[in-house]
Amino acid sequence: MNSADITTVKSILSQPQKIAIIPHRNPDGDAMGSCLALYGFLKAKGHTVHVVAPNDYPKFLKWMPGNDTVINFERENPKAKEIIEGASLIFTLDFNDLSRVGQMETSLQEAAADFIMIDHHQQPSDYAKVTYSDVSMSSTCEMVYNFIAFLGETDLIDADMATNLYTGIMTDTGSFKYRSTSSKTHRVVADLIDKGADNMAIHQEVFDTNSPSRLHLLGVALSNMVILPEYKTAYITLTQDELDQYDFKKGDTEGFVNYGLTLEGIIFALIFIENREEGIIKISLRSIGDFSVNEFAREHFNGGGHNNAAGGRSEMSMEDTIAYFNGILKNYKDKLNP
Ligand code: 5GP
Ligand code: MN
């Protein structure tokens, strides 16, 4: 954020505002963590604040401080719409384009409020009065910490806010191991621990709450894995029938895609998950090194994200999606074998 932006934000926040904070659809730890931390900060500064999530999110995020105050746009639609319509200021966090909020997009487009975007995804759209976009950042949570620091108010970060910010940085960095994890990230995290984030308890809340059915589903996913050494690629499929058989709950497949990358020599991993209700195959893509899954997802699967982590979708059947994928993969042989 440049100094003109900081001045603008300071001036807006010097008056009491009615604020809505919005994460992307299917919010993850970084989206919820950044929204809930910013919620705590803006409340502390005396604003009227609501977090409105486009839809539901996994149980392993529902322990987060402030979770009970989150409004679900799908479930509490009239209330959510009223908040968005009545807002004087809307923060959009952890996404780069209004299409990433699904059904909520029209409400946001029609909103009278000024927008502030805080996000680390590539190619941000230009809809906000203030755009704080930095693709080098580990997470939106690290950026919310910086945002508060730009305003000179890190003293206002309490233990709940620190917990939320820690959670998002931890989940978006694969527990501090991805390339985007910088020494600055660690300095922020150190300060969050000093401010009351209990790192061990947070890890347990997020990662050690497996159900037996989820582990069995992981077993199915791993036995379905197809390895294509000539393309340094591994992919997993999960059909709706398989999900049903193992009592699938939102979030159960989180992290499955990463197993492909733990194979020696594999630099491109995907998971294709059937969602019969939405009539789509949801795709998660991951890579190691310079192969850009953001470009791959944008080009072929109507998606996007970061260089090494992206998502997309297909409206074909699983069988046709895989056939299509195998077809396009042929054109990437050189890029995958640099
Ligand atoms: P995941 O595979 O965990 O759902 O998402 C990986 C990354 O890609 C996240 O940063 C997420 O925000 C982004 N992403 C996931 N799905 C989509 C999509 O359909 N479109 C775009 N533009 N980004 C996505
Ligand atoms: Mn993120």
Image (spheres, rainbow, N blue to C red):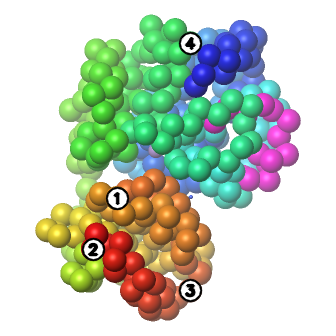
Q: Residues within 10 Å of mark 2 (few under 14, many from 20)?
A: few
Q: How many marks?
A: 4
Image point 29% across, 46% down: which residue?
Answer: 178
User: Which quadrant, please, contains the N terminus?
Assistant: top right
Q: Nearer the viewer, residue 97 or 334?
A: 334
N-terminal of the pair, mark 4 or mark 3, is: 4
| In this picture, residue 247 sits left or right of residue 234 | right
Secondary structure under badge 2?
A: loop
Is residue 114 located in the magenta-colored stretch of the structure? yes
Is residue 190 located in the magenta-colored stretch of the structure? no
Q: Mark 3 vs ligand 1: CB under 8 Å?
A: no
In this view, 337 is above or below 108: below
The residue type indicated by label 1 comes to Asp
The residue type indicated by label 2 comes to Asn
| In this picture, residue 120 sits left or right of residue 289 | right
Secondary structure under badge 1?
A: loop
The residue indicated by pointer 4 is: 151
The residue type indicated by label 4 comes to Leu
Q: Taking the image as drawn, is residue 122 in sight? A: yes
Q: Quadrant of residue 237?
A: bottom left
The residue indicated by pointer 2 is: 337
The residue indicated by pointer 1 is: 290
In this view, 185 is above or below 318: above
Whole-number angstrom distance, CA of label 4 to CA of label 3: 48 Å
**Residues drawn in magenta:** 104-117
The residue indicated by pointer 3 is: 316
